[in-house]
Amino acid sequence: MKLPTKTNMVCLFLTLFILGGSKIDPAYGADDSIKLEKQNWSFNGIFGTFDRGALRRGYQIYSEVCASCHSLEYLSYRNLEEIGFTAEEVKEIAAEYEVQDGPDDEGEMYLRPARHSDKFVSPYANEKAARAANNGAYPPDLSLMAKARKNGPDYIYGLLTRYRDEAPDGTDIADGMNYNEVYPGYQIAMVAPLEDETVEYADGTKATLQQHAKDITTFLTWTASPEMEERKSLGIKVILFLVVWTAMLIALKKKIWSRLD
């Protein structure tokens, strides 16, 4: 009696697919010639999970620093309950913004306070308005930024921590641009958004540049993969099932072949 090797391989590939995102690649920037500092993220590895404190601090940074320019168009306010906010807190957060709704009974569109079920309100009405407010540069949506860049978390952390006041000798920086050791081409329109004590943390955590960068990176990794913990949990269950199933098949094979001895 032969073991169903083909079936086992299919299950193995399924498991690897479920655990996708757990693989740790060498840390490179968007340009592979740019080496990044590899960080020890709590969500790395098969058993990795999101640090809830970091997620809440990361949201605080987003709301106080990033939200004035960058959107989170794929995230709803109610998703914040997944990282530890209460339903009442989410309701209060959403109510700070207005969304267009309607038409009403008279056929007119109107503005109302956002609800927990609404998507995060964009800081700009459209791309042209965004460019007009930023000297032609377009602040990208951050929902999937951790997936949009190779080694996204390390890239985001490096981008936020490796601004330099002066470019190396021989490097020309265009007007209105800033030198960054990680950004492709080394010139970025966005000024350094973070420094020590940019945000005063509600939980009393020491507000260093590195802490800010780690917290917002953790938050943006969650926005890109909010299902990560559930996916990893499912993958572990599948692996345990395959181990038990394989052991049972081996025992069955031995029992059947023992009769032929």
Image (cartoon, rainbow, N blue to C red):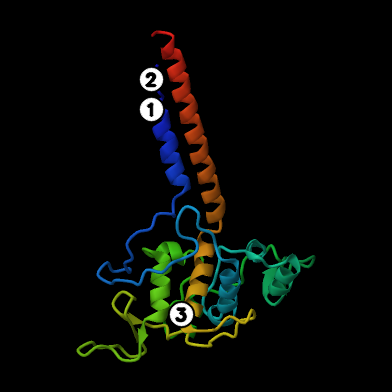
Q: Name the residue under label 1.
A: 5
Q: Which residue lies furthest to the front in this view?
A: 261
As helix, strand or loop, the secondary structure at mark 2 comes to loop
Q: In which quarter of the image is residue 176?
A: bottom left
Mark 1 Cα within 10 Å, few/some/many (few <14, many 20+)?
A: few
Is residue 111 in view? no
Measured along the vertical axis of the image, is residue 201 above or below residue 50?
below
Q: What residue type is labelled 3?
A: Gln
The alpha-carbon separation of the residues under discs 3 and 2 comes to 55 Å
Measured from the top left, where is residue 99 in percent x and y? 67, 71
Measured along the vertical axis of the image, is residue 197 above or below residue 97?
below
- On the rendered image, what quadrant is the C terminus found in? top left
Along the viewing direction, whichever of 158 and 64 lies nearer the viewer: 158
Measured from the top left, where is residue 19 in percent x and y? 46, 49
Q: Mark 2 points at which residue?
A: 2
Measured from the top left, where is residue 112 in percent x and y? 73, 73
Q: Name the residue under label 3.
A: 210
Along the viewing direction, whichever of 184 and 133 lies nearer the viewer: 184
Mark 3 Cα within 10 Å, few/some/many (few <14, many 20+)?
A: some
Along the viewing direction, whichever of 76 and 239 lies nearer the viewer: 239
The alpha-carbon separation of the residues under discs 1 and 3 comes to 48 Å
Q: Do the residues labelled 1 and 2 touch (CB within 8 Å)?
A: yes
